[in-house]
Amino acid sequence: MKAVIALVVIYVGTFFLAIQGSSQNPVSAAPQQTSAAQDQSAQAAAKPMDPAKDADLRSLMELIGARDQVQDAVTTSSEQYREKLLASVPNSDKGQAFVNSFIDSYQKKFDVDQMTEQVIAIYDKHFTDDEIKIMLQFYGSPIGQKVAAEQPKINREIQAASKATGTKAAKEALKAMKAQNPEIGQSARLTNTPPRWQLGARGQQGQSQQNQPQQAAQQPDPPQF
């Protein structure tokens, strides 16, 4: 029984991690993801689900807080998209308004209920009704409820730790490669290339550097690692 409970925690924990991880995808990938999700939803709709299993799955989604997790992922991804866009548009009132409008539109277009239905369809594909009932027994218990409540926090901490560890490893690896190949690695960096409008602004600053040395000094290049 302990092994079964462990598997239940892993399976549903993976769902939480997948939902949170989906917010890491770039904005440019959104159309492709939406198309794939719509295809998957259409395929699920073509095959009616057993009513009893459908009821069990909806009860499970309620117990693990699936809809709340999807909504939380939308909020998290909104902030990440905001950060990315702010770094790529002009630093002005119009640029800020553009980003705010995008975030508002994105949140309105992301159908949380539809995404939750897709999660139900995915679980229907991968688990039998008997397996779903085992999950219901576990998540209906006090320890199961604690797992459901703590899992999102655990996943966020895991993601943060993974990001920090990955960043440290990448910096150390690049530093070592630069030492081994100084000629090739001299210009290598892990930061994104600044957008063209920023490059153009820096070019103008370079032309006026002699007249405005202090202002130019306040506009450093992105750090190299």
Image: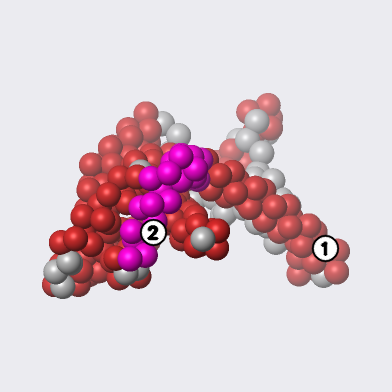
Q: Is residue 23 magenta?
A: no
Picture residue at 43% right of the left edge, 44% below the top: 141
Horizontal relation, residue 215 to residue 110: left or right: right
Horizontal relation, residue 159 to residue 51: left or right: right
Q: Residue 112 or 4: which is nearer the viewer?
A: 4
Picture residue at 20% right of the left edge, 72% below the top: 43
SS of the residue under disc 1: helix
Image quadrant of residue 145? top left
SS of the residue under disc 2: helix
Q: Name the residue type under label 1.
A: Ala
- Asked if residue 195 shows in the view, the reply is yes
Per the model, the C-alpha gap separating discs 2 and 1 is: 50 Å
Q: Residue 48 or 135: which is nearer the viewer?
A: 135
Picture residue at 70% right of the left edge, 52% below the top: 165
Q: Name the residue type under label 2.
A: Ile
Q: Residues within 10 Å of mark 2 (few under 14, many from 20)?
A: some
The x and y percentages for residue 56 are: 26, 56
Image quadrant of residue 126? bottom left
Q: Is residue 151 magenta?
A: yes
Q: Are marks 2 and 1 in contact (CB under 8 Å)?
A: no
Residue named by callout 1: 176
Residue named by callout 2: 134
Horizontal relation, residue 67 to residue 109: left or right: right
Q: Residue 158 or 213: which is nearer the viewer?
A: 158
The x and y percentages for residue 107 are: 28, 42
Magenta segment, which residues? 130-152
As drawn, 163 above or below 128:
above
